[in-house]
Image (cartoon, grey):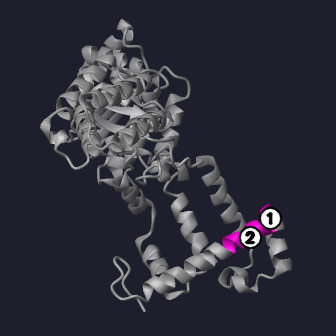
């Protein structure tokens, strides 16, 4: 996500932070590079101009000239102004009489149906009683798709009715009768310039009386997403935005532009196809990703959502006691894989997303797969005690995993080195964050 933009900005800032003092010309040269990077990333030109004007006004001021590291101070200013451009995070309005209605709108293919299910799953985890509504009666199999997704997250789907405004009204009544707290309307995709279909959307809104009208927009459409948002906002009055396919957008300009141009807050980002791949929008964390500073909070949230706390504690105790086996390692590897693609996880670690690191995400994924295959090809005894792996056993493991004896040797050596190091650290009193457990 934002990889091209992030790489170019980091290169510019690296050149800036290597200088001792910064002249006004140095600042202007760096900001010229930032301007080109933002425009290439498809950020709206008016947003770029306003953003850089604010940065320059602060960057040539006394705070920067007196700073210990002027270059780092400029990067700090860019980060703060980027957060301001992205806007305050929008939160769902779940106030008022139940059920509260959330209406999703947007173009066909923007990911509304999948997003409806993701949002339903997220709210269900928060204790809400959710009803999904199949109000998209235009796209073939849209109703069936929502039913399949609803079944996967254990959320019922309302399907009665032949006209979308009637479906919406009947669904709200059914939700109230069933004691639901939230009703999510999945409407058909439509162009903002199609007056007939937009009138239908207005009728749905008037009948269902939603507390939220959220535009689901494909981030990969770039500046067109901004124009789409403006059109829908004018017709039906948007209360928020959900940007989808953000994980596949190397440029990321739409995310930076939309709040500033439309005045409508971004509320969620869609980061994949899975039903849990929806995260609340946080401008600070998004700015950190764009500037290559990682997203440790996001990584922690992923870990908390996917890793078993007791298993992790047990693994930590085994590590420092020296009883951690390849079998345990395989279990932890599978736990980490639940958190998402390894490339995405690496990008959330500060310092591992910049151009200088040159981390091949595909190669990292392949290495995970090779490691898993090697351990799976071992017998339970070999996993618990790698010392029994003689030449013939290693050849068998290599053949069974589709790897080489060298790769088997490398994995075993790295594992033993880790075992030895962790045992030494665990035996030291007062080691920060890793107290003696024996």
Q: Quadrant of residue 175?
A: top left
Going by the picture, which residue comes out furthest to the left?
Answer: 62
The answer, for residue 429, to whether it is visible in the render is yes
Circle 2 packing at 10 Å, graded few (<14), some (14-19), many (20+), is many
**302 vs 235, nearest the viewer:** 302
Vertical relation: 257 (above or below) 244:
above
Numbered disc total: 2
Q: Position of residue 19 (x, y in %)?
A: 33, 42
Tag shown at residue 404: 1
287 part of magenta stretch: no
Which residue is pictured at 32% across the width and 28% down the height?
A: 31
Q: Would you say residue 410 sits in the magenta stretch? A: yes
Residue 427, above or below 48: below
Q: Which residue is mark 2?
A: 408
The span from disc 2 to disc 1 (Cα, nearest Å) is: 6 Å
- Position of residue 343 measured from the top left corner of the image (x, y, whole percent): 53, 49
Element class at badge 1: loop
Residues in magenta, as a range: 400-412
Q: Residue furthest right?
A: 392
Horizontal relation, residue 432 to residue 326: left or right: left
Position of residue 170 in the picture relative to residue 321 (left or right):
left
Main SS of residues in magenta: helix
Q: Position of residue 391 (x, y in %)?
A: 84, 79
The spot of residue 347 in percent (x, y) is: 46, 49
């Amino acid at each position: 996500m934002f990889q091209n933009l992030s790489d170019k900005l980091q290169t510019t800032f690296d050149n800036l932070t290597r200088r001792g003092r910064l002249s006004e010309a140095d600042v202007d040269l760096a900001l010229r590079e930032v301007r080109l990077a933002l425009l290439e990333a498809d950020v709206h030109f008016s947003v770029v101009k306003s953003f850089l004007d604010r940065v320059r006004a602060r960057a040539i001021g006394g705070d920067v000239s007196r700073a210990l590291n002027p270059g780092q101070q400029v990067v700090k200013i860019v980060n703060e102004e980027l957060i301001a451009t992205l806007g305050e995070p929008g939160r769902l309005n779940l106030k008022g009489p139940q059920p509260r209605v959330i209406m999703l709108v947007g173009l066909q293919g923007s990911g509304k149906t999948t997003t409806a299910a993701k949002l339903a799953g997220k709210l269900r985890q928060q204790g809400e009683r959710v009803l999904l509504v199949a109000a998209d009666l235009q796209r073939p199999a849209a109703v069936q798709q929502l039913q399949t997704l609803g079944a996967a997250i254990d959320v019922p789907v309302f399907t009665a009715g032949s006209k979308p405004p009637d479906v919406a009204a009947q669904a709200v009544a059914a939700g109230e009768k069933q004691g639901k707290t939230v009703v999510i309307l999945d409407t058909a995709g439509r162009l903002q310039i199609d007056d007939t279909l937009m009138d239908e959307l207005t009728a749905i809104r008037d009948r269902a009386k939603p507390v939220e009208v959220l535009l689901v927009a494909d981030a990969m459409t770039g500046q067109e997403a901004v124009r789409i948002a403006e059109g829908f906002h004018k017709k039906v009055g948007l209360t928020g935005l959900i940007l989808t396919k953000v994980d596949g957008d190397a440029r990321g300009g739409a995310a930076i532009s939309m709040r500033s141009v439309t005045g409508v807050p971004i509320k969620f980002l869609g980061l994949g196809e899975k039903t849990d791949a929806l995260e609340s929008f946080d401008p600070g964390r998004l700015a950190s990703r764009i500037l290559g500073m990682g997203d440790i909070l996001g990584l922690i949230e992923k870990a908390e959502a996917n890793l078993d706390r007791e298993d992790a504690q047990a693994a930590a105790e085994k590590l420092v006691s020296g009883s951690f086996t390849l079998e345990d390692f395989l279990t932890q590897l599978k736990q980490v894989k639940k958190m998402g693609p390894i490339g995405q996880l690496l990008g959330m670690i500060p310092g591992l997303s910049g151009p200088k690191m040159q981390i091949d995400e595909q190669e990292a994924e392949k290495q995970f797969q090779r490691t898993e295959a090697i351990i799976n090809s071992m017998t339970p005894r070999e996993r618990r005690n790698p010392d029994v792996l003689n030449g013939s056993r290693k050849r068998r493991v290599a053949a069974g995993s589709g790897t080489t004896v060298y790769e088997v040797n490398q994995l075993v050596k790295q594992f033993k080195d880790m075992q030895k190091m962790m045992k030494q650290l665990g035996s030291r009193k007062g080691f920060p964050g890793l107290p003696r457990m024996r």
